[in-house]
Amino acid sequence: MRDVLQRGIRSLVVFCPPGIIIGVLAAITITMTMTTTIGVGTGGFVLPAPVLAEPSMGQFLIPSRYFEETGHNVGGPFLAFYESHEAIFGAPITEVLEEQGVLVQYFQYGRLEMPLQSSAQVRITPLGSLLMRHRSGEPAFARHEAGPAEVSTYFPSTGHNLSHAFRPFWQRHGGHPVFGAPISEAFIEPDTPEVPRSTVQYFEHARLHYRLDHPGAPPAIWLGPLGADYAQQQGVSPQALAPSRPLVILGTATMDFGSSPSYARNIRLAARQFERLKISPGEEVSFLAVVGELSPRTGYVEGGGIVNGRIGQVIAGGICYLSTAIYRAVLEVGLEVTERHSHSLAVPGFTDPPNMDSAVFMHDGRGYENPYDVDLRWRNTTPDSLLLTTEIVTRQLTVSIWGYRNDHDYDHDHDQATAPDDDNPEAGAGHHSR
């Protein structure tokens, strides 16, 4: 989990909209801005054996798509780029790996990479150039003169021609941004145990094969497995190549918080604190610790909340929609709930289903460990890290908990919620609003 102590945990009251007891559904759906562009030429590295980059799950690897044929996930910006060029890369053959400050993922026919910096963009590794460096002295790889313009396109940057059946294929499937420029002429590659005899041409990012099965047949064009070749050259470990489990939403919850602008503002501010929240195995999460200070100084406004047993106005009113959503998502995953309190009033919206709400309250607004605080706490009892995401669309909040799907079920009998009573400090929340 992010280091909540460094962020300062301070503030607030029990927050509920009028007519609804404060709570929150659990199932965060991260909304990410993913800008992906293709880089040409300089993105490749010859590196030591890579390592699995599991921490990157908390950075961008959702939403995610699982490939049964190879047993690997593609997610985040990689997925956004990949789905526009799926036929060119083939299926993933690793999860995301970290290689000297660069996140990379190997596919059958290529590799995508992205530096760890937050503003970095996805680019294609120039595998053709990297793998063929040792062949630069061969005739097919030496610079050539331009061919006839009617049938070929010449690339002065590399000194090679693109023509015949390769040119329309190259143009239809992304051209220079995807394949790069040609780094060889077309030539016949001898038979190997892996590749039958065919005409081939190498590009900065790829290798194309061409063969006529018989006179008059349409040409067969396919991509060479440069991603698999480069993974072997780099010494990617068997562990990294072995199938992984699907990265999926394990638990989710959605709540409608109505049309109140104050609820929308407060919920959005609180939900930001939970976006991309990574929880390690065995780690306990405190809602109050994560959400931090809840005051006008941090942007919160008055909204509906329970004040002395009645609906009134409190700073940050409405954030119990978030705590309730998280609670419900946590229960769906089957995690251990170590602290949870119902609201002191039964209000429509938090009582269906019954006893599935989660009130939160901060007594003095300056710390979250006051004896009178009312918190939601839960523990990651799975063997893997989990990731929380939030999404707000119009008046609906969705909280999702992502993780690797396991073959066993978790224990669903951990909830230790306390029943509402007249001494619930939630009733005095309004006295601490500012």
Image: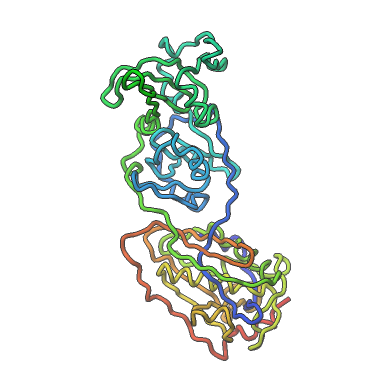
Q: State the image coordinates of residue 320 (x, y, percent, origin top left).
A: 59, 74
Q: State the image coordinates of residue 364 (x, y, percent, origin top left).
A: 65, 77
Is residue 175 depicted above or below 385 in this figure? above
Q: Is residue 433 left or right of residue 106?
A: right
Is residue 106 depicted above or below 359 in this figure? above
Q: How is the image coloured?
A: rainbow
Is residue 413 depicted above or below 147 in this figure? below
Question: Front-most of 201 and 158?
Answer: 201
Q: Residue furthest bottom?
A: 422
Q: State the image coordinates of residue 300 (x, y, percent, origin top left).
A: 70, 68
Q: State the image coordinates of residue 95 (x, y, percent, origin top left).
A: 41, 45
Task: Write down the quadrant of residue 196 in the picture.
Answer: top left
- For image coordinates 38% across by 35% down, the residue present is 108
Q: Is residue 252 left or right of residue 314?
A: left
Question: Front-most of 288 and 97?
Answer: 97
Is residue 131 depicted above or below 47 in this figure? above
- For image coordinates 40% across by 39% down, the residue present is 50
- For image coordinates 59% across by 80% down, the residue present is 21
Quarter of the rendering occupied by the C terminus: bottom right
Q: Residue furthest left?
A: 193
Q: How many marks?
A: 0
